[in-house]
Image: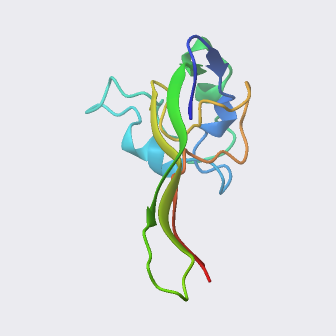
Amino acid sequence: MFQGVGKRKVMINPEAFAPLWQDYQMPWTIHKDHWTEDNPNAYFPRIYQYKGNDFNFKTADRWVQNGAYFRLKNLTLGYTVPVSKKYIDRLRVYVTGEDIWEHTNMLSVFDPEIDNDTKRSIYPFFRTWTVGLNVSF
């Protein structure tokens, strides 16, 4: 099944980007692309080491993300093996994928289905695969 949204703007609460405030925030993402003299066009502002200096992470249009996306939500492929044994009535092999593929322009640490102003408990897009074997006797 495919799923998507053609046009959507998502306001990410800037506290989600504030590095090192809480364990659930994204320090690795920020450290990979924060402002330095060598990286003046970085996505994130300069990192400060103390909590009281949060002025770079106030609400601003900088944190508005393009929430449009197109996603392959789930797919199952299976094959029923012809059996001629008298002890097996049916044998089926299958693989199922959830959240298999996605195209979006949002930062990869966000799922484009999140609510506006999201700042806590943010998980990225996860893929899951299930491989199975059904045997009927």
Q: Residue 127, position in %: x, y?
A: 51, 52
In front of the other: 28 or 11: 11
In front of the other: 47 or 133: 133
Determine which quarter of the picture holds residue 62: top right
Looking at the image, how many numbered discs can be counted on the residues? 0
In front of the other: 99 or 118: 99
Determine the residue positioned at 29% across, 31% down.
39
Q: Is residue 97 above or below residue 106?
A: below
Q: Residue 108, position in %: x, y?
A: 47, 38
For residue 39, side relative to residue 15 (left or right)? left
Determine the residue positioned at 37% across, 28% down.
42
Determine the residue positioned at 52% across, 49% down.
27
Q: Residue 134, position in %: x, y?
A: 57, 73
Location of the C terminus (image quadrant)? bottom right
Q: Residue furthest bottom?
A: 87
Q: Is residue 136 above or below residue 22?
A: below
Location of the N terminus (image quadrant)? top right
Q: Is residue 71 above or below residue 65?
A: below
For residue 114, side relative to residue 124 (left or right)? right
In front of the other: 83 or 10: 83
Colour mode of the rendering: rainbow
Determine the residue positioned at 69% across, 29% down.
13
Q: Is residue 3 above or below residue 79?
A: above
For residue 80, side relative to residue 4 (left or right)? left
Q: Residue furthest left?
A: 38
